[in-house]
Every structure is written in structure tokens, then in C-alpha cells.
Image (spheres, rainbow, N blue to C red):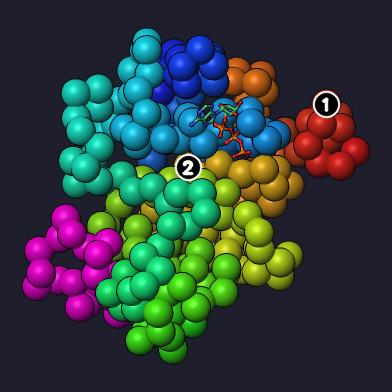
Amino acid sequence: MLSAEDLNVFYGSIHAVKGVSFDVNEGEIVTLIGANGAGKSTTLNTIAGLLHSKTGSVTFMGENLGKIPPHKIVSRGMALVPEGRRVFLQMSVQDNLEMGAYTQKSAGIAGDIEKVYEQFPRLKERRRQVAGTLSGGEQQMLAMGRALMSHPKLLMLDEPSMGLAPLLVEQIFEIIQRLNKAGSTILLVEQNAQMALSIAHRGYVLETGKIVTTGPSGELLASPAIKKAYLGG
Ligand code: ATP
């Protein structure tokens, strides 16, 4: 479904992503894990067309995304939930969800919102509440719900666990797994390697801009080197 080939991304003279290649097959949860500053967000933002790679290519559903502007990438079936959620804080829950439907025909939107509320009952209870007053976990749910409004084939999540209490992290990961079982393909960027590998099919480990290891999640979880570096021993 998605293939990234030889990405090299710079911020001025900083070479943040160095020759990164990976792929995501339809139906998978694939995770990119790594420490602070390893280049995970940069990689994801490059896939979404928000940053530019000096070399290589991103192919999605057989199409090279190189020449497609970021605002059109959503209509190709890719949605990104950015780090820090970035919901519209002054707007209600319901209005945030409607904003996520800007690529959709208006006839289907009300039904799509109801489907999001089925996935996230807490959002339904708070539909009139201003997003800025939601808890961190609720904002994460809203950001995910808003992304789902565009009917993505590929859902990309940038550190959904960030700043959340352990119980909420578990809930968010359960939801990610449920969305995957319902048909969404997922690319998950996480610092919480243990949680990410516990739900992903495969993982890639990024270190200072390079992929150093890849494999099925079970293998990565069992690897002594990964345990030492990312799983607390
Ligand atoms: P984190 O888990 O902390 O979000 P990350 O793995 O997502 O980390 P990136 O945010 O992709 O890492 O950052 C990769 C490198 O690029 C880091 O060295 C970071 O300081 C640098 N970087 C990121 N954004 C910028 C920017 N806007 N300008 C300059 N350097 C940047």
C-alpha cells in the first residue's frame, strides 16, 4: 500500500532522516519506534507531503506522491493524526469532526459522524463541548475521529500515547487495534516501544535518522538489543 524509498530529509544543515526505506502492506499495523529526535515525526511528515525528501520517493496505492500537494494527499486516502493532536481548540467536538470531512460529499457526513461516535462514545457525550476543554485522552480520540472522517485507507498516528496516563494509553491502543480489525491500515509512530510492538504486526527501529532494525513485532520484542535500548532492559 505504502512504500517509502531512500528518504533524505534536512532542516537546513541538519540531516534528520538518512536514507530511510520502509513499506506498509494493506491490513497491517506497522510501527516506527525510536528515541527522542530519532527522526520518526520527520519521516511521517514527509510521507504526508508536509516535508520534502531530497532523494527517493513515496508511493501510495501505486501512485508516486512526489508531485501531489499535501492538501490533495488526504483525498488519495491518507490521514495523519499529528503529534500533540492539534484539534481546533475553540470549536466544538462536532464541528471538529465536520472539519475532518472536507474531502467528503455532504450527504454522508452526518452518518459518518454517528460512526465516529459509535467508536468513541465519550465524544458523543461531549459533542457540544469546546475541544480545548477536553482531557488529553479525549483530544486524542477527537483527533483520531476527525482523521477517520476522511475515510482513510491508511491512518498515520504520531505518538498517540504522548502525555497520557497509562490507563488511557491502553484505551487508545485498544481503539487502534479495533480500527485495524475493522479494516484500517495503520502506520504508528511511537516512543512507547513496548505498547507499539504489542499491537503492531511489524516494526522499524530508527536511530539518529537511520533504520537500524526491522522485523515482526514478536522478534523485536524478544531481541536482547531492543530490550536493552527501548524496553527498559
Ligand atoms: P520525538 O519522539 O522527540 O518527537 P522524533 O523521532 O519524532 O522525536 P523528529 O522530530 O523527527 O524526531 O526530529 C529528528 C531530528 O530533526 C532531531 O534532531 C530534531 O531536533 C530535528 N528537527 C526536527 N524538527 C526540526 C525543525 N523544525 N528544525 C530543525 N531541526 C528539526
Magenta span includes 109: yes
**Amino acid type indicated by mark 2:** Leu
Q: Position of residue 102 (x, y in %)?
A: 18, 59
Residue 183 in which image quadrant: bottom left
Check the picture and name the quadrant holding the C terminus.
top right
Q: Secondary structure at mark 2?
A: strand
Q: Which residue is mark 1?
A: 225
Q: From the viewer's perspective, is 181 left or right of 160?
A: left
Q: Residue at x 18, y 72 (%)?
A: 109
Q: Which residue is mark 2?
A: 187
Q: Residue at x 59, y 20 (%)?
A: 209
Residues packed near mark 1 inside 10 Å, few (<14), some (14 to 19) or many (20 plus): few
Magenta stretch prevailing secondary structure: helix
Q: Which mark is residue 110?
A: none
Q: Against 98, is 216 above or below?
A: above
Of residues 100 and 10, the one drawn nearer to the viewer in this rendering: 10
Q: Position of residue 27 (x, y in %)?
A: 42, 46
Q: Against 222, is 124 above or below?
A: below
Of residues 120 and 42, the one drawn nearer to the viewer in this rendering: 42
**Amino acid type indicated by mark 1:** Ala
Q: Position of residue 40 (x, y in %)?
A: 55, 33
Residue 7 in which image quadrant: top left
- Ligand 1 position by quadrant: top right
Q: Secondary structure at mark 1?
A: helix
* Whether the residue under disc 2 has CB within 8 Å of ligand 1: no
Q: Against 43, is 140 above or below?
A: below
Q: Position of residue 1 (x, y in %)?
A: 34, 34
Query: Who comes first in sequence, dot 2 or dot 1?
Result: 2
Q: Which residues are magenta?
A: 97-114
